[in-house]
Image: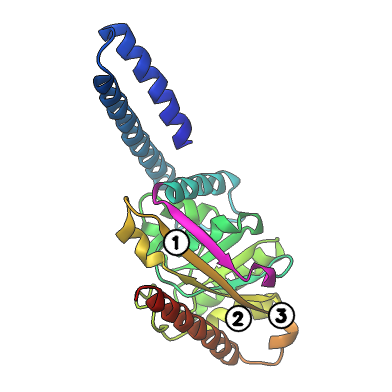
Amino acid sequence: MIEIISIIGAIISTALISYFNGIYGELIDILWIVLILYGTFVAFIALFMIAGYIISAVVDINKPIKKPSKFHTFVYYLYLSFLNRSFNIKFIVEGEDKLPEGKCVFVMNHRSNFDPMLLAQKYKKRNILMVSKPGNFRIPIAGGVIHKMGYLAIDRDNDREALKVILKAVDYIKQGYSIGIYPEGTRHKDGLDLLPFRHGSFKIAVKANVPIVVTAIHNTQEIHKNFPFKRTRVYLHILKTIYPEEYAGKTTAEISDEVAALMTEDIKRFEAEKAAKNK
């Protein structure tokens, strides 16, 4: 999309320069083209943000939805594609052969606001809906959109409401969606350890009787730092898929401890390899 707009802007700018100004020096022509391209890009970003704000603002996030909206899902993935290109993100996956067939629950550590967006876009065909904190649904540009596309807001301090969300997530899985959860409950910027896991988040997989895909994401906290001049390499490690027959009979606390151990081991390995490369 951005490339097409840039090309159109270049053609228009060249035509305008030739028509109104005649033949100038090559340097002046190039400067005009650069200025118009930059203006076109800035205008496109502004229009894109305004459109996103309007689409999100008209949504009542307090009104429950019966079925995820295809329109808002389309808008969401369009927004993700734009963000990934704009922030110059290189997404590298390790262990993809460990993914199960069909619906599942993705479990991931949480480093940045980019985490759910990158996972959702990478596995778009799996229709991943995220369980998120209520505050994210009040974000002006995205809150209404993620509500309409089926993302679930969970209040972990209210057991009754949390159970409703868990049951809703199970219902979505029955409809063919996959679910993404963050057992830490919030972002953790220190990559050397994990925040304490909330065991109840694993009830979704247990009640739905689907595989748990244990993943670890690395380097997303660097995206903001590197923008706009440096590419960020983000790594997603698929560590293990725990199938229902493997966790049958275990408590959610036991499942949680197993997942945390796998993630912690991978985080330490990644950080050690990163430190060795920087020496």
Q: Nearer the viewer, residue 28 or 182?
A: 28
Q: Which residue is mark 3?
A: 243
CA distance separating discs 1 and 3: 30 Å
Q: Nearer the viewer, residue 183 or 119?
A: 119
Q: Nearer the viewer, mark 1 or mark 3?
A: 1
Stretch of the chain drawn in magenta: 86-99
**Structural crowding at the residue carrying mark 2, measured as other residues with C-alpha within 10 Å and reported as few (<14), some (14–19) or many (≥20):** some
Q: Amino acid at mark 1?
A: Arg
Question: From the viewer's perspective, is residue 16 above or below residue 75?
Answer: above
CA distance separating discs 2 and 1: 33 Å
**Structural crowding at the residue carrying mark 3, measured as other residues with C-alpha within 10 Å and reported as few (<14), some (14–19) or many (≥20):** some
- Is tag 2's residue or tag 1's residue first in the polypeptide sequence? 2
CA distance separating discs 2 and 3: 14 Å
Name the quadrant of the C terminus. bottom left
Q: Nearer the viewer, mark 2 or mark 3?
A: 3
146 vs 188, left or right, is right
Q: Is residue 198 visible?
A: no
